[in-house]
Amino acid sequence: NALNSQVMVEVTTAAAEFDADPGIGAIVITGNAKAFAAGADIKEMATLSFSEVFDADFFAAWGKLAAVRTPTIAAVAGYALGGGCELAMMCDLIIAADTAKFGQPEIKLGV
């Protein structure tokens, strides 16, 4: 469950739709028992130069999620790595299972 551009658009679109519904009091974002989110899809970005990634604005979705006014909750079990860790940190509240592991492994990739 890597966070590629399509997944991020789907997550932020759903969050915006929920945000517009006055009957929804909170938005819970979760993954599965193995991983909340494995991070950004490195394969999607690997063939692009820095300027291409910058121009494509891969991270515009983060701004859309930050604009959501309905409280967001990250329910984390398993791994929340890289972009997955950042997604959890963007939420208003993190509820972490005993199995939750947070990390930024991309520092070893030079991205």
Image (cartoon, rainbow, N blue to C red):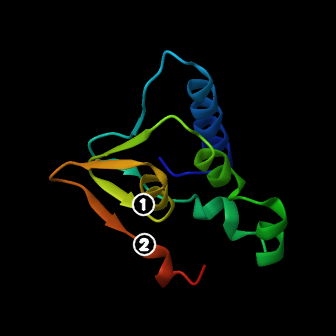
**Mark 1: few, some, or many residues within 10 Å (few <14, many ≥20)?**
many
**Mark 2: few, some, or many residues within 10 Å (few <14, many ≥20)?**
some
Q: What is the secondary structure assignment of the residue under circle 1? A: helix
Tell me if 49 is positioned left or right of 103 in this view. Answer: right
Tell me if 103 is positioned left or right of 41 in this view. Answer: left
Q: What is the secondary structure assignment of the residue under circle 2? A: loop
Q: Which residue is mark 2?
A: 104
Give the mark nearest the N terminus, 2 or 1.
Answer: 1
The spot of residue 99 in percent (x, y) is 18, 53
Mark 1: amino acid? Cys
The spot of residue 100 in percent (x, y) is 24, 55
Mark 2 and mark 1: Cα distance apart in space: 7 Å
Tell me if 58 is positioned left or right of 103 in this view. Answer: right
> Which mark is drawn over residue 48?
none
Kindly identify the residue that appears in the image at 43 percent across and 58 percent down. 89
Tell me the quarter of the image containing the C terminus: bottom right
Kindly identify the residue that appears in the image at 54 percent across and 18 percent down. 22
Image-quadrant location for residue 26? top left
Q: Which residue is mark 1?
A: 85
Where is 58 relative to 8, above or below? below
Kindly indicate whether the residue at mark 1 contacts the one at mark 2 (C-beta within 8 angstroms).
Answer: yes
The spot of residue 5 in percent (x, y) is 67, 49
Where is 41 relative to 27, above or below? below
Where is 35 relative to 31, above or below? below
Kindly identify the residue that appears in the image at 62 percent across and 51 percent down. 4
